[in-house]
Amino acid sequence: KKKIAVMTSGGDSPGMNAVVRAVVRMSIHMGCDAYCVYEGYEGLVQGGDFIRQMAWDDVRSFLSEGGTLIGTARCMAFYERPGRLTAAKNMVLNGIDALIICGGDGSLTGADKFRAEWPSLIEELVDNKELTPEQVAPYRHLNIVGLVGSIDNDLSGTDATIGCYSALSRICEMVDYIEATASSHSRAFVIEVMGRHCGWLALLAGVATGADFVFIPERPRDQDWREDMKLVVQRHRKMGKRKTIVIVAEGARDKDGTKITPEQIKDLLADKSEGGLNLDTRITTLGHVQRGGTAVAYDRILGTLQGVEAVKAVLEATPETETCVIAINENKIVRKPLMQAVKETKEVAIAVEAKDFDRAMSLRDTEFSD
Ligand code: ATP
C-alpha cells in the first residue's frame, strides 16, 4: 500500500487546509494510506509525533478554516545536508514513499533538492548503519509533487497561487472600509500591501478599488514620480473626488532602484507648502490581516482540485518522471516541471534587484503589460 504524506511549508496562505483535506481524502479514496507532516520540514526532521497517519474524518471541517491546521515553519536544519539526512531516515522509518508539499518557491526548491539527493542520502544512511539495505530497498526513489501556496501570486507558470485571491479580497474589503472614512473627512490614505518582488496584490487591488495611484516593484515609477502623482491626485480632486487612495507594495521603488516608502508618499500628499496638495493624510499598513482569515471560494476550489491532481501525479509517476508542480493555466489544472517554475520565479526577483525592469516585466504575466 502506498503511503502518501502532505505538508505545508513557508508562509501560510488561505486554502492550504483545502489542499491537506483533498490530498488526505483522495489518497484514501485511491486505496493509499494518508499522512500529514506537521510543522513543515521541521516536522520531517523531528519525526516522531510530527508525522501522523490521517483518517477520512481527521480533515473534517478543514475547508472553512484559515491558515494551515497542520502548522508550518521555517526550518534551518533542512537547508543543510545533515538535516535532510535525518528527514530521509524519518520518511523511511514511517514507510512514506511520496511527499506532496504546499509552499512557496523556497519550500519547492528544498523539495527538489531533497529529491535530487535522495539516492545518496539513502546510501549514506546504509553506510552509517542507521538503516539496513532491506529497510531502504523499497525506497530507492523519492516521489515529490509541489503545490504553490502563496498570497503574493508570485510563482511563474501558474495563473494563480493558492491563497492569492483570498488576500486580494481581504485587501479590497479593507480599502472599502478605509474609503468610507476617507470620504467622510476628505482625507488621503496611503495603504501598504504585501509584495516584496511581486506587485500582483497591489496592482489588482488598485484595479478592484479604483485607487488613485499604485506603486509596484516590477514597474517602477520615474524618478519624478512625485510630480506624476501630484498631477493625478489634483485631477481627481478637481473632478470632485473626496478621497484619495494610494496603494503601495512593500517592494515599491523608483527606476534608480531606490525604495519608495509610504512615508515619502504621505509627505507629498500632505505637503503644506505653496502649490502642495495639503491633504490630511494617514498611512495604513495592512500587514497580517492579508494572510489571515478564511479562504475565499476560489482558493478552496483551487486547493481541492490541485490536491486531487497532486495525488494523481504521485500515482502516475515513474522514477524517470520529472518533479512536477501543479499549476492552473487558463482555468485548467496542469502539471509543470517544478524547477523551471522556481527558476523563472527567482529570475524575476533577480531582475528587480538588478534594476533590469524590462526583463522583470517580460517574465511576468499579461496583467503587467501595457
Ligand atoms: P514564502 O513564499 O511564504 O516565503 P517559501 O516556501 O518560499 O514561502 P521559505 O522560508 O523560503 O518560504 O522556505 C521554507 C522552508 O523551506 C525553509 O525554512 C527551509 O526549511 C526550506 N528551504 C527553502 N529553501 C531551501 C533550499 N534552498 N534548500 C533546502 N531547503 C530549503
Image (cartoon, rainbow, N blue to C red):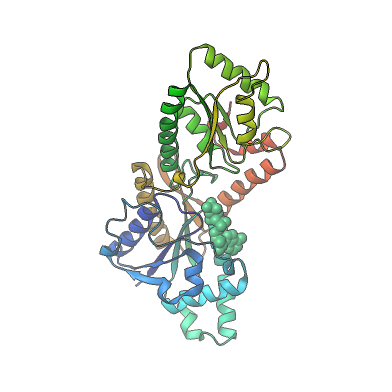
Which is nearer the eye, 259 or 50? Answer: 259
Residue 286 sits above or below residue 130 on the image: above
Residue nearer the viewer, 249 or 161 = 249
Kindly tell me whether residue 108 is visible in this rendering. Answer: no
Pick the quarter of the image with the C terminus.
Answer: top right
Which residue is nearer to you in this view: 143 or 274?
Answer: 274
State the residue in front, 342 or 290.
Answer: 290
Instruction: Look at 59% across and 47% down and name the residue there.
Output: 345
Residue 103 is left or right of residue 301, and the answer is right
Asked if residue 201 is positioned above or below residue 25 in the image, the reply reads above
Camera sees residue 31: yes
Number of labelled discs? 0
User: Residue 329 appears at what percent x and percent y?
Assistant: 45, 41
Image quadrant of ligand 1 equals bottom right
Q: Position of residue 37 (x, y in %)?
A: 42, 67
In what quadrant of the picture does the N terminus appear? bottom left
Q: Where 244 sits versus 67, above or below? A: above
From the viewer's perspective, tell me whether residue 336 is left or right of residue 64. right
As drawn, 112 above or below 231: below
- Residue 84: horizontal and vertical position, in percent? 56, 71
Residue at the spot 59% in from the left edge and 85% down from the top edge: 127
- Identify the residue shown where x is 37% and y is 58%: 20
Which quadrant would residue 30 be assigned to in this image? bottom left
Q: Is residue 370 left or right of residue 153?
A: right
Snapshot quadrant of residue 275? top right
Q: Position of residue 254 (x, y in %)?
A: 69, 33
Q: Please report the residue visible at 61 percent of the width from the left and 39 percent of the height from the top.
A: 363
